Amino acid sequence: MDIQTPVILGLVAFGVIATLTFIIKSLIIICLPNEMVVITGRRRIGPDGREVGYRLLHGGRTLRIPIIERVSRIDLTTIPIEVVVKNAYSKGGIPLIVHGIANVKVCAREPVSYNAVERLLDKPFEDVMQIAKDTLEGNLRGILATLTPEEVNEDRMKFAHVLIEEADEDLRKLGLELDTLKIQNVTDEVNYLDSIGRTKTAEVLKIARVSEAQRTSEAEQIEAAARQAAQVATIQADLKIAEESNRLRVRRAELDGEALAREAEASVAGVKARVVAEQALQQERIGLEQRRLEADVLLPAKADKDAAELRAKGAAAKITEDGRSRLFVLEETIKLYKGAGSEAERIFMLNMLPDIIKEIVSSVDGMQIDKVTVFDSGDRASGVGSAAGQLPGAVIRLTEQIEAATGINILSRLAAPKVEAPPAAPPVASPAEKS
């Protein structure tokens, strides 16, 4: 194989690739975001229903038929335009000079984009800028004729807004779109605005001075009122403090009184409790003492009483039985005396004689005679003979006393002839012994 054959084949392949690339590039149309592509050469129906000979592409890509369709591009970047209007007569005939800045661009939204294609396609950038500038200046002059210099100067935002509304419709007809519009400066050659400014300034200064004086007066009044309010507030605060202090002292006194009262109540309650406890203790003591007295006194006394009653009953029973026995003996003795006849009196006296002698002796029972001294002078009528001679007389006087007391002459009874005594009665058992 010849060495030139690969080179030729490479050149052919390169040419084919280049040709294909050129053909593909000529067929595919790519639209950038900041541009609008107009493809002309075939009939199309526009948005308003009329027939047009082009189609629009805003961003993206599309295919075109070579030779038949032609591609044109419209720049959509913003166009800054300086708007200057001189000797524009405002309402009232005052010529004004207005400086502003506007940002204008070609509108890519339908149906305004069709106006841009029909009016601005293939026009130079400078021509488009001049068209927009002339349109804006004309609209600006028209708006100034309806406004006074004061309105234009005082409310520039409103002026710009009215201007945008007025110029936007005309720019849309040209296929343009107004992004922003700012009024930078408003002047005049006859110093009208300056005079108005000085007048306004003087009036403002006057108002400012008056307002300042008023504000100063108001400030002084407010300051005086504030001082008065502060003094009143201080007095009221002092009064409030005094009232609260008095209330605090009263409350403290009340609390102290309550504390003292409760302390007194507690003390009284303690004393009362102590008294109640002592009373209870005394009651217990009384109960114990009662029980002790019952145990030490009442019960023994009751026992003694019961014993005494029993002894009395026993003694009474004994006395009763003794009385019955004596009565029985007396009755039997009487029966014996009645059976003895005339000797019964003598027998009775003999039975009574020991008792009589005992009674007579008891009359001198308390006398004690240690010794008897007899002085004998040698005379028979005195001394021992006289003492011995007095004994029979004393016996006789004793029998006389017995006779005077009982009516029985013991000596005559003793001198009477002896009579045999009846046999002694057998001992008779008393009713108690019988029982």
Image (cartoon, grey):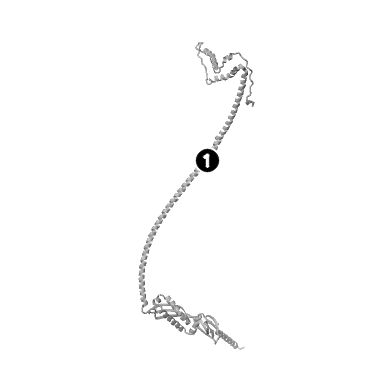
**Relative height, residue 177 to residue 248 (above, below):** below
Residue 80 horizontal/vertical position (percent): 45, 80
Q: Residue at x 41, y 55 (%)?
A: 243
Q: Residue 53, can we see it? A: no
Residue 136 horizontal/vertical position (percent): 44, 81
Q: Residue 261, can we see it? A: yes
**Relative height, residue 240 to residue 53 (above, below):** above
**Left or right of 118 in this view: 209:** left
> Residue 327 lies in what quarter of the image?
top right
Mark 1 crowdedness (10 Å alpha carbons): few <14, some 14-19, many ≥20: few
Q: Which residue is mark 1?
A: 283
Quarter placement of the C terminus: top right
**Left or right of 183 in this view: 319:** right
**Relative height, residue 93 to residue 226 (above, below):** below
Instruction: Looking at the picture, tell me which residue is in the foreground, 165 or 283.
Output: 165
Quarter placement of the N terminus: bottom right
